[in-house]
Amino acid sequence: MASLDSVYVFQIKTLERWLKKNGYLLIMKKGLEDQIHFVKKCVYINIKHKPEKRFCYLLHECGHLLYCRNAALSNRDVPLLYPHVLGVDRAVCVNQRTAIFKSSSVIEEVNAWMCAKDLCQKLNLYYNNERLNRYMYKALYTYIYEYGKEGYIRWSRKQKNKEKGGKK
């Protein structure tokens, strides 16, 4: 019987073929930040990860592709949350310090993990749900922790005035 590591390595190749069919290139090298780049049409994965973690993070990045495509097709929040679908870097379009951006980023992350699970089922790939969820929770926590470190950001001036006891 094949080890789980060899199963994950095989499934990474399956996802690489899926990405290629969707016009994306997979780049795996030491020290890379795991991410999808919509403008360059590349997915970057750190090769130093063990095969299971590499598979889970690659699957998640594929989930971003599915989620953003679905959002664009249904015209759901594309200009604010997914300008990269339109070929524009999100950093140029959206003030990343706003609560709206931070909240929408967390929502996108959760939905990308859910789309990743759907893709697994569609491609008939094996995953350990408990372990995949653990990777998801750790990744989501880093977003929440980092955004929390930056401090509370008010939603609007109206709220700021309300907190100071001024006009509502």
Image (cartoon, rainbow, N blue to C red):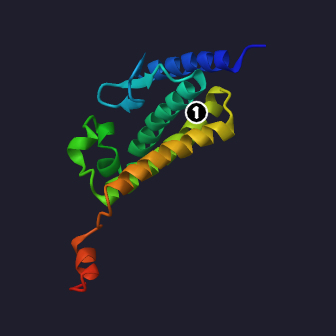
* Residue 141 at x, y percent in the picture: 48, 49
Q: Nearer the viewer, residue 42 or 162?
A: 162
Residue 23, compared with residue 141, is above or below; it is above
Q: Residue at x 55, y 36 (%)?
A: 116
Residue 112, compared with residue 152, is above or below; it is above
Residue 166, compared with residue 97, is above or below; it is below
Report the side of 166 relative to 145 (left or right): left
Q: From this viewpoint, which residue is outermost toward the right?
A: 1
Report the side of 167 relative to 75 (left or right): left
* Residue 12 at x, y percent in the picture: 56, 20
SS type, badge 1: helix
Q: Quadrant of the N terminus?
A: top right
Q: Identity of the amino acid at label 1?
A: Leu
Q: Nearer the viewer, residue 151 or 159?
A: 151
Q: Is residue 76 visible?
A: no
Q: Where does label 1 land, which residue?
A: 119
Report the side of 4 relative to 106 (left or right): right
* Residue 110 at x, y percent in the picture: 50, 47
Say few, some or many: other residues with alpha carbon within 10 Å of mark 1 (under 14 / 14 to 19 / 20 or more). Answer: some
